[in-house]
Amino acid sequence: MTPRVIMAIVAGVLLLVFWRGRNAIWGGATIGAIVGLALALVKGGWSLLALSFAIGTFVGLGAEGLGRLSDRLKRNS
């Protein structure tokens, strides 16, 4: 398996874990899929779709983690 496929599988698992509700992970995945589709149509490489989908999901995971950390720090102070 190529690293792009592994990243796409991990991104899919993250989406399953964060299935409920709207959150930054789903937003990142959506933006990544839109950008990846545009790149795939222009460049012709469909593996770009999986790569940008995975990157968008990971960026969303980072944003979701920062939001949760901020909430936790506000509660503790």
Image (spheres, rainbow, N blue to C red):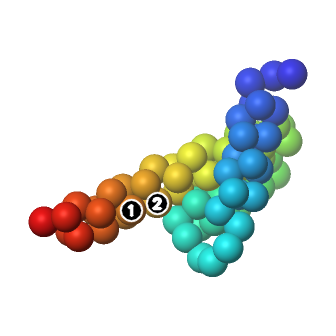
Tag 1: amino acid: Arg
In the picture, the disc for residue 64 is 2
Q: Quadrant of residue 76?
A: bottom left
Question: Residue 66's spot in the image, x, y percent?
Answer: 36, 56
| Mark 2 Cα-neighbour bin, 10 Å: few <14, some 14–19, many ≥20 | some
Q: Residue at x 79, y 40 (%)?
A: 9
Q: Give the Cα separation between the discs numbered 1 and 2.
A: 6 Å
Please give the residue where the numbered disc 1 appears in the rendered image: 68
Q: Quadrant of the C terminus?
A: bottom left
Residue type, label 2: Glu
Quadrant the N terminus occupies: top right
Viewer-nearest residue: 63 or 70: 70
| Mark 1 vs mark 2: in front | 1
Q: Is residue 32 visible?
A: no
Mark 1 secondary-structure assignment: helix
- Measured from the top left, where is residue 50 in percent x and y? 77, 43
Residue at 74%, 24% (x, y): give it.
3
Q: Please state which of residues 70 and 47 is positioned toward the viewer in this rendering.
A: 70
Left or right: residue 40 versus residue 21 is right
Q: Is residue 34 left or right of residue 70?
A: right
- Compared to residue 5, the image places residue 57 above or below, namely below
Q: Is residue 56 above or below residue 20?
A: above
**Is 44 situated above or below 72?**
above
The reply to whether dot 1 and dot 2 touch (C-beta < 8 Å) is: yes
Q: Residues within 10 Å of mark 1 (few under 14, many from 20)?
A: few
Element carrying mark 2: helix
Rendering coords of residue 45 (x, y %): 83, 37
Which corner quadrant of the image does residue 54 belong to? top right
